[in-house]
Structures are given as structure tokens and as C-alpha cells.
Image (cartoon, grey):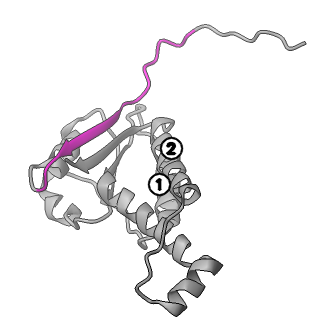
């Protein structure tokens, strides 16, 4: 029989995962970079997934734009590397900004659609009719949802502050 394992609580709060939601051009990116002004954060890594605005806010303070190839797997790899970067000299957390979660979901939708179109049955269907309606099946949507959850969980369990912007 297993033994009950317990420990005393540390009293240390978890770092937040922040969602910044709004319509296009309402300042979500600027707001997500407001953490730069705090002396209580170390490095800020910006993952610009679609709008291409990360470069225009350089005057807000020091941050680093993570260069991405456009694939979900590259995003995961680069986020993993950023999360592994050490905190500041006094334990200041790093900040990880995903701009935007809407573009991330679009990336996953295209990934699921590509997988559906590449199935043997659908390749044959497309050969016969290039305009055929291709159904992205539930297992592919579940895989996309799991990828989304994996990335969010990476941020939740990191030793830094996660920020995801989304379009409302």
C-alpha cells in the first residue's frame, strides 16, 4: 500500500498567467509590455505570432523578440528555451508574451487542416476534385486543443510571468 506524502506549504505564490483581450488596435500589445517598466522583472521574451508589431514598441523598454519559423513545433521549442533562461540576480522572474493567442489558434487550425488534407482518403478526394470539402475530424481538433493546452500549461508551470493577448 502507498504511503501518504505531505509537506508544509511554502507560502510562495505562483507566478500569474495573464490574458489581455480586446479588439484590434486597442493597445493589447502595449499593455502586455507594461511589465517592462517594473524593476521586479528580469527579461521579457515576446513571441510575435501574427501582427508583426513587436518591433514597433522598442521605446517601451528592453525586451527581446523571439524569432520563429512559423510552425507550432518551433514555437514550443523556442518557448521551452526561453522558459529555461535563469531568473534575475535577485530572483526576478522572466516574462513570456504570446502575441497573440488568436494567431496561435489560427496556426493550430491550419496545422489540423493540413493533417486532414494529407490523409490518404482526402488526398485521393482532392486529386479527383481540388475543391472538395475536407472535413477536419474530431481527433484532429482534439490534437489541436491538446497542443493549445500544452503551451498554456508550459506558461502556467514556468517560473515566470506568462501573458497571452487575444482578439475579442
User: Dot 2: what SS?
Assistant: helix
In the image, is 88 to the left or to the right of 10?
A: left
Quadrant of the image for the N terminus? top right
Dot 2, how many residues are within 10 Å of its Cα: few (below 14), some (14-19), or many (20+)? some
The residue wearing badge 2 is 154
The residue nearer to you, when weighing 81 against 131, is 131
Q: Nearer the viewer, mark 2 or mark 1?
A: 2
Q: Nearer the viewer, residue 129 or 50?
A: 129
62 in relation to 42, above or below:
below
Quadrant of residue 66 within the rendered picture:
bottom left
Q: Residues within 10 Å of mark 1 (few under 14, many from 20)?
A: many
Q: Residue shown at 22%/45% (left/top)?
A: 32
Instruction: Report if the CB atoms under discs 2 and 1 are less than 8 Å apart.
Output: yes
Instruction: Evaluate whether residue 53 shows in this view.
Output: yes
Number of marks in the rendered image: 2
Q: Residue 133's x, y, as percent?
A: 43, 76
Residue at x-position 52% and y-position 92%: 128
Q: Residue at the spot x=17%, y=48% of the render?
A: 28
Write down the quadrant of residue 8 in the picture.
Answer: top right
**Relative side of 67 to 148, left or right:** left
Magenta stretch: residue 156 in it?
no
2 or 1: tag closer to the N-terminus: 1
Magenta stretch contains residue 11: yes
Q: Secondary structure at mark 1?
A: helix
- Tell me which residue sits at (9%, 50%) in the image: 26
Relative to 82, does residue 17 appear above or below in the rendering? Answer: above
Q: Main secondary structure of the magenta part?
A: loop
* Number of the label disc, if any, that sits on residue 79: 1
Residues drawn in magenta? 9-24
Amino acid at each position: 500500500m502507498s504511503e501518504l506524502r505531505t509537506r508544509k506549504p511554502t507560502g510562495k505564490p505562483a507566478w500569474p498567467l495573464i490574458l489581455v483581450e480586446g479588439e484590434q488596435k486597442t493597445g493589447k500589445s502595449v499593455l502586455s509590455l507594461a511589465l517592462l517598466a517594473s524593476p521586479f522583472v528580469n527579461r521579457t521574451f515576446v513571441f510575435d505570432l501574427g501582427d508583426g508589431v513587436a518591433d514597433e514598441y522598442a521605446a517601451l523598454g528592453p525586451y527581446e523578440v523571439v524569432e520563429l519559423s512559423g510552425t507550432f513545433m518551433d514555437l514550443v521549442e523556442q518557448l521551452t528555451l526561453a522558459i529555461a533562461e535563469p531568473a534575475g540576480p535577485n530572483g526576478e522572474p522572466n516574462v513570456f508574451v504570446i502575441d497573440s493567442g488568436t494567431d496561435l489558434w489560427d496556426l493550430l487550425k491550419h496545422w489540423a487542416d493540413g493533417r486532414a488534407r494529407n490523409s490518404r482518403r482526402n488526398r485521393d478526394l482532392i486529386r479527383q476534385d481540388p475543391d472538395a470539402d475536407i472535413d477536419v475530424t474530431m481527433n484532429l481538433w482534439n490534437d489541436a486543443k491538446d497542443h493549445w493546452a500544452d503551451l498554456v500549461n508550459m506558461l502556467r508551470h514556468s517560473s515566470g510571468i506568462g501573458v497571452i493577448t487575444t482578439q475579442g
